[in-house]
Image (tube, helix red, strand yellow):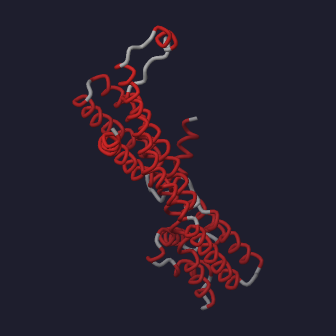
């Protein structure tokens, strides 16, 4: 089981462009988790006491590996987006090199320019390592193991198939570049068309929901004050028996948890709309949650009490 997990982690690290071994990544993650847990637990002990510090320590210790793994997935997705963005230009350069009379391997190596980013480094590394002893098919298989991209896999399959069958490689590369660029333009157009819906979602998560949660807490507080100020009859007391009162502190905690869930859901949705991947949307989670929490605090402490005071 452990060997299987290490092998899967090795594949993830390779896709992310990291040269670390899985064991080294696990060791660093453990060190970061313990260090972060100690620091956060110390702050919690000063502010909230020993019991809260122990709970925060365990929670941080468990959350840090998850955060590191999510960061790894985001690095993989970032490389995919970068590669697919420059792929049309790279294919056109390779096609021009082959038209100039270079062999496929030399054409690929000559196209590995610094401005092509991650894929340029991988192409230089693989072609230099092969030193003429590897075929183009072996190099393309190695590229597939280092960059996770369905679009790149299809282009490499087309490239090797054209070489094997003796087809017009230059025309195939230029056609693929045009198709990929057209797909990218269609995606950008789709993102632009759905930007209005994204704005409505963000407004609901950041402004509307925190304000309504603050209003509900204030209303519950008013009802509790009215009930405690009035003389409760025997029937009302009997009917209310077994139903514990809900404090404002409990509702505040529930509201924060709701904001966490809604911010996470909205960030995943934005990742799907903008990049076609949920993991990419996690980078929006923290800004969304902080903004929603700030609006909730301002509404709960300032805006809603001011409105209630005006209505009295």
Looking at the rendered structure, the number of numbered marks drawn on it comes to 0
From the viewer's perspective, is residue 102 above or below residue 165? below
Q: At x 43% / y 46%, what residue is drawn?
A: 68
Question: 96 or 177, which is in the foreground?
Answer: 177
From the viewer's perspective, is residue 265 above or below residue 134? above
109 on left or right of 292: right
From the viewer's perspective, is residue 57 above or below residue 280? above
Q: Which residue lies furthest to the left in this view?
A: 46
Residue 218 appears in which quarter of the rendering? top left
Q: Which residue lies furthest to the right in this view?
A: 165
Q: Position of residue 207 (x, y in %)?
A: 42, 51
Q: Where is residue 83 in the image (x, y as percent from the top left)?
A: 53, 69
Q: Position of residue 84 (x, y in %)?
A: 56, 70
312 on left or right of 267: left
Q: Where is residue 244 in the image (x, y as percent from the top left)?
A: 45, 17
Residue 207 in view here = yes
Q: Which residue lies furthest to the bottom in this view?
A: 100
Q: At x 53% / y 51%, what residue is drawn?
A: 268
Residue 164 appears in which quarter of the rendering? bottom right
């Amino acid at each position: 089981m452990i060997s299987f997990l290490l092998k899967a982690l090795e594949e993830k690290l390779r896709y992310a462009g990291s040269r670390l071994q899985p064991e080294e990544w696990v060791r660093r993650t453990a060190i970061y988790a313990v260090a972060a847990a100690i620091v956060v637990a110390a702050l919690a002990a000063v502010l909230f006491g020993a019991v809260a510090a122990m709970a925060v320590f365990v929670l941080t210790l468990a959350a840090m590996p998850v955060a590191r793994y999510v960061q790894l997935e985001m690095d993989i997705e970032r490389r995919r987006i970068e590669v697919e963005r420059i792929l049309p230009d790279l294919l056109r350069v390779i096609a021009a090199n082959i038209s100039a009379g270079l062999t496929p391997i030399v054409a690929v190596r000559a196209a590995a320019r610094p401005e092509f980013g991650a894929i340029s480094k991988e192409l230089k590394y693989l072609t230099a390592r092969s030193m003429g002893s590897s075929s183009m098919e072996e190099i393309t298989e190695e590229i597939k193991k280092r960059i996770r991209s369905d679009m790149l896999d299809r282009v490499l399959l087309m490239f090797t198939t054209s070489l094997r069958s003796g087809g017009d490689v230059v025309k195939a590369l230029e056609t693929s570049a045009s198709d990929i660029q057209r797909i990218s333009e269609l995606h950008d157009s789709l993102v632009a068309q759905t930007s209005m819906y994204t704005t409505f979602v963000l407004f609901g998560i950041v402004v509307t929901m925190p304000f309504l949660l603050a209003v509900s807490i204030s209303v519950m507080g008013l009802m509790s004050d009215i009930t405690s100020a009035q003389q409760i009859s025997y029937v009302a007391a009997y009917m209310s028996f077994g139903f514990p009162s809900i404090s404002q502190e409990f509702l505040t905690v529930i509201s924060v948890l709701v904001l966490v869930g809604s911010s996470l859901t909205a960030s995943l949705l934005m990742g799907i709309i903008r990049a076609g991947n949920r993991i990419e949307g996690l980078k929006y989670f923290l800004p969304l949650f902080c903004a929603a929490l700030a609006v909730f605090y301002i509404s709960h402490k300032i805006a809603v009490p001011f409105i209630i005071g005006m209505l009295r």
